[in-house]
Image (spheres, rainbow, N blue to C red):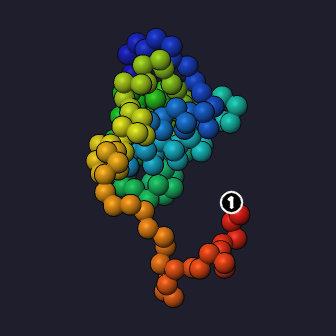
Amino acid sequence: MNRKPPDGWHCEKPMAWCRAIRPVALPAGQMCVALALASFANAGDGKNARPGLSRLQWVTGTSRSTVVSALGELEQMWLLHCSERSTGRGHASVYWLTVHDEIERYGSTFEDWTADRRPADAGGKGSAARPFRGAKGPVPPEQGSRISA
């Protein structure tokens, strides 16, 4: 892959990388592969994730084609960098978890996501919240709950 990385490109620790990619609009299979790959990276610098395709299939419960396409898409967005390509069976590719200054263009905020998918929640419309009614009816206030106000 001989593309020029975007400005501000750098490797990131796995948990920080997971937080950074959280708002990125990825399909479920790609997000699953991304988060699984992060679990294999070095904790200190986010480098040297080398689980192999079969291991990623097993961890994510997805197909081989989903894993391969997810890795390709993540590389296209510069959320992953492949430092070494696989040379065959027993020699997995080596990935680095990367972020860059342009990551915002791939995502949206939780509030935007909610408004797009649940317009009734975004507008404040709909019915008012009702107390929970269990199998025996509502819980009388004197019995209360274990949570104190």
Q: Quadrant of residue 112?
A: top left
Front-most of residues 134 and 94: 134
- Look at the image and tell me whether residue 3 can be seen: yes
The percent position of residue 56, horizontal first and vertical second, equals 48, 50
| 146 or 60, nearer to the observer | 146
At 43% across and 24% down in the image, what residue appears? 103
Q: Quadrant of the N terminus?
A: top left
The answer to whether residue 138 is above or below residue 88 is below
Quick check: can you spot residue 84? no
x and y, in percent, of residue 42 in the image? 66, 36
Residue at point 48%, 70% (across, down): 131
Q: Is residue 126 left or right of residue 11?
A: left
What's the amino acid at mark 1? Ala
Q: Residue at x 51, y 17 (%)?
A: 9
Residue receiving disc 1: 149
Q: Is residue 143 left or right of residue 71?
A: right
Label 1 Cα crowd, 10 Å radius (few <14 / some 14-19 / many 20+): few
Q: Position of residue 13 (x, y in %)?
A: 63, 31
Residue 114: quadrant of the picture: top left
The front one of 112 and 126 is: 126
